[in-house]
Amino acid sequence: MDLWILHADTPYRMYREKRSFSDPALHVHADTLRPCDRTVMCFAFWADKRESDEVAWQSCLSMYEDATEKLKNAPCHVIFSIEDARILSGQTRGRLARLRRRGIRILTPFWSGCNRFGGAHDTDTGLTPDGQRLCTDAMTLGMLLDVSHASRRSFDDMAEIARGVRMPLLATHSNFFAVTPHSRNLTDAEALTIAGSGGVIGLSLVPAHTGGAPDVSALFAHIDHGIALGIGDALAVGGDFDGTDALAASLHDAGDLAKVLLPAMTARYGEDFTQRFFYGNALERLGAYLLQSKDK
């Protein structure tokens, strides 16, 4: 099995809880990935809301050093992202360039509430002028914008910027609002915009986003909806591993993707669709942007 997971907060837990990548307490650890033939992991550095912007910036740098050391022998290709751009503070361009040189490939500008760049899903605020510059600069540097956690207005603003530079948008861990009406989930129009840009929608495994059914069947309702919209080839594994206390009840860690989700999806959707969901769609749509040398 090949596997591409678009969002895991594992570096945060390794750093804060002083865990190694072999620690089975993590949702994603080395043993969960070893059964896979090819694996790509998108690991996020989350800016802790309890810290000031500047302290959170320093924490993210320390988290990066910690993660690069602990993941150097990981059985996967590693891609890094930043979740909540407030850490860039008043030195946006310089810090963006610094992160890009260190291999940061994905930028999730928001988490909750408002920051200097705009508003998250729980607000009605779009991008500020600083946010417009941030997103333009990030994409100019070759980073992809992640609309997960963005408000409806921020999404529209980010989509316009992506169209202008002809780069794909992605939602690394979001589902469909029409199936589960949660502010973190995408409207059909947003989902079609992402797919039309050449991007992907990584489906979240958080029960609040799937609809809370006691097994993976809740996820199937979102997959079915994506297929009905004609964008089944833009769906992928999102996850939100190590960023939530609860996953779909039959999934305990990333290893259960192969043990539980893979056979269930293969039985329902067939082998070809399932393999593309697990790996092929992300590779085809994002590979040219994300699978490249660190120092472009």
Image (tube, helix red, strand yellow):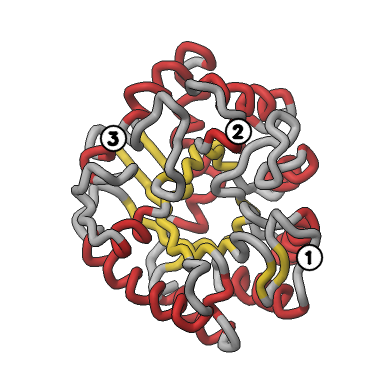
| Residue 112 vertical position relative to residue 262 in the rendered view, above or below | below
Task: Identify residue for label 2.
Answer: 233
Q: Nearer the viewer, residue 104 or 87?
A: 87
Give neighbour class at mark 2: few <14, some 14-19, many 20+ (Cα, 10 Å): many
Q: Residue 233 lies in what quarter of the image?
A: top right
Amino acid type for the residue under numbered disc 1: Gly
Q: Nearer the viewer, residue 283 or 17?
A: 17
Secondary element at tag 2: helix
Return the disc, 3 or 2, that comes first in the chain's sequence. 3
- Residue 113 picture location, percent across and down: 67, 63
Mark pair 1, 2: CA separation: 29 Å
Left or right, residue 284 beside residue 229: left
Task: Identify residue for label 3.
Answer: 36
Left or right, residue 124 beside residue 162: right
Residue visible at 70% across and 74% down in the picture? 131
Residue visible at 55% across and 23% down in the picture? 213
Give the foreground label among 3 and 2.
3
Amino acid type for the residue under numbered disc 2: Asp
Left or right, residue 10 beside residue 249: left
Give neighbour class at mark 1: few <14, some 14-19, many 20+ (Cα, 10 Å): many
Contact (CB < 8 A) between labels 3 and 2?
Answer: no
| Residue 277 vertical position relative to residue 296 in the rendered view, above or below | above
Residue visible at 76% across and 74% down in the picture? 128
Amino acid type for the residue under numbered disc 3: Cys
Mark pair 3, 2: CA separation: 21 Å
Residue 126, which numbered label?
1
Residue visible at 72% across and 69% down in the picture? 118
- Residue 130 picture location, percent across and down: 71, 79
